[in-house]
Amino acid sequence: MQQNNRTKELGTAPIGQLLMKYAVPAVVAMTASSLYNMVDRIFIGHIPEVGTLSLGGLAVTFPVMNLSAAFGAMVGVGCSTLMSIKLGQKDYETAERVLGNLVSLNIIIGIIVGGLGLLFIDPLLLFFGASENTLQYARDYMFIILLGNVVTHLYLGLNSALRSTGHPHVAMWATIATVVVNAVLDPLFIFTFGMGIKGAAYATILAQMVALAFIVYVLSNKNDLIHLRRGIYGLSRHIVKSVLSIGMSPFAMQLCACLVVILINKGLTKHGGDLAIAAYGIVNGITFLFVMVVLGICQGMQPIAGYNFGAQQPKRVDEVLKKAIMLATVTMCCSFVLCEFFPHYPVKLFTDDPELTKLSVSGMRIIVSLSPIVGFQIVTGNFFQSIGMAKRSIFLSVSRQLVFLVPFLLVFPEVWGTDGVWMSIAAADGVAAVTAGVMLWHFYHTQPTRRVPRIRQESTLRRVFFHNRVTP
């Protein structure tokens, strides 16, 4: 079958060529996803008279969306990683059951998280930093997003499955479709129909529904080795346990991000007010565009590293890691150059307010001061996740957010005010990158070096794999 050939090439094709094949579509998809979020902010920021307050309201919704995304990432990343490993082991039956469990888990979790979010929407938004001025706009946007939470979870989860089953380009086009549909519907709903920030939320959910229908159609192709069919949706205790174990790292990362954004919002509210919150929304949108590119590189690396780890090919695992780190570092260096030396240009896309522009430019320059080393840290954490070493990946995710960033956020703003919030983010990135380097060094120095014969390398890697593996 065609899909069988596509998965086999993960263990035979040249790594550079393979990484480009899988990473480029993922980068395009992740960049499109970031632009997809930016489109909402750009149009919302230009709503007459209330654009600045609407941006502040939108920024307050980030923790709630991060909280929801944490559960979606736990299922989506856990399932896609497990599928890659099982395909590498040629356990196609289990890989297909993982796909079915992905659908069931996303529906169940999507309903629970969306329902609880709607039930406690006002207390959540107030807790996450909404003020009397921004609460109405945050509620209008978040209510609609939570109503469509199941659609969001299924869209993101099945999009991850596309890459693991040999459809990276389809995943890319599905994400691009959401951007195009969202960009068309945003001005129509926001301005033409006069729906304001509600229109942006409706555009978001409708765009995801279109993409989800396309993804389900592709994954239902009976000619593919792994496809959606009857009999695979019943939850398996062993599969669910394995998925949650692997997915705990992105879950922890998103959950910590939620906590961090709460502290950021509270620090900015205390020292800079609603305008500072709006500035953070702008800065986060611009800088996150580059982070999404790096995450796209990681998504391209994930099936290659996972398959070859499962197939016991350590040299190919090492090579894809090195190439991914190189690409991620180049990307974050580009972020540094743009945001340090030409920050006014991207900020102008979001606002014409002089004071908001000044605050955004100042914050962005501080945040990206250590960005050239951020790519290495992100790739390293995703590498451990890709080969099923969940504990290492979880530690890297949690340490950056909780162990480093939270203490900085509690101390720096009290000394340097609003600038202290921006400085906290940059300092945490630097310490996290050093920590990732130490952990990667330790990982390779507990393995045989390249001078050791290949048979010994594979034997040791096999012991590491079977010690850390998840077995449905």
Image (spheres, helix red, strand yellow):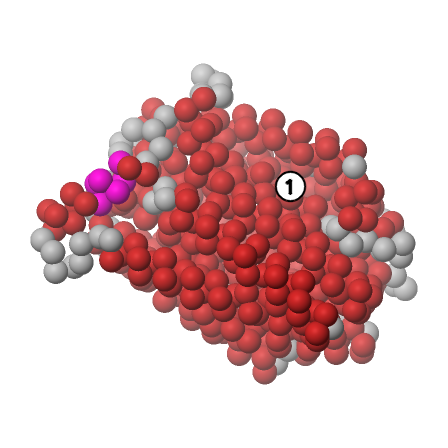
Q: Quadrant of the C terminus?
A: top left
Q: Where is residue 454? Give x, y as percent.
A: 12, 51
Q: Where is residue 332? Give x, y as percent.
A: 48, 69
Residue at (49, 18) in percent of width and height: 234
Q: Dot 1 lies on which element?
A: helix
Residue at (58, 38) in percent of width and height: 71
Q: Main secondary structure of the magenta part?
A: helix
Q: Is residue 462 magenta?
A: yes
Q: Is residue 124 above or below residue 196?
A: above
Magenta-drawn segment: 461-466
- 290 and 20: which one is in front? 290
Q: Amino acid at mark 1?
A: Ser
Q: Is residue 166 visible?
A: no
Q: Is residue 192 above or below residue 87?
A: below
Residue marked by disc 1: 68
- 432 and 369: which one is in front? 432
Q: Quadrant of residue 206?
A: top right
Q: Where is residue 230? Give x, y as percent.
A: 47, 18
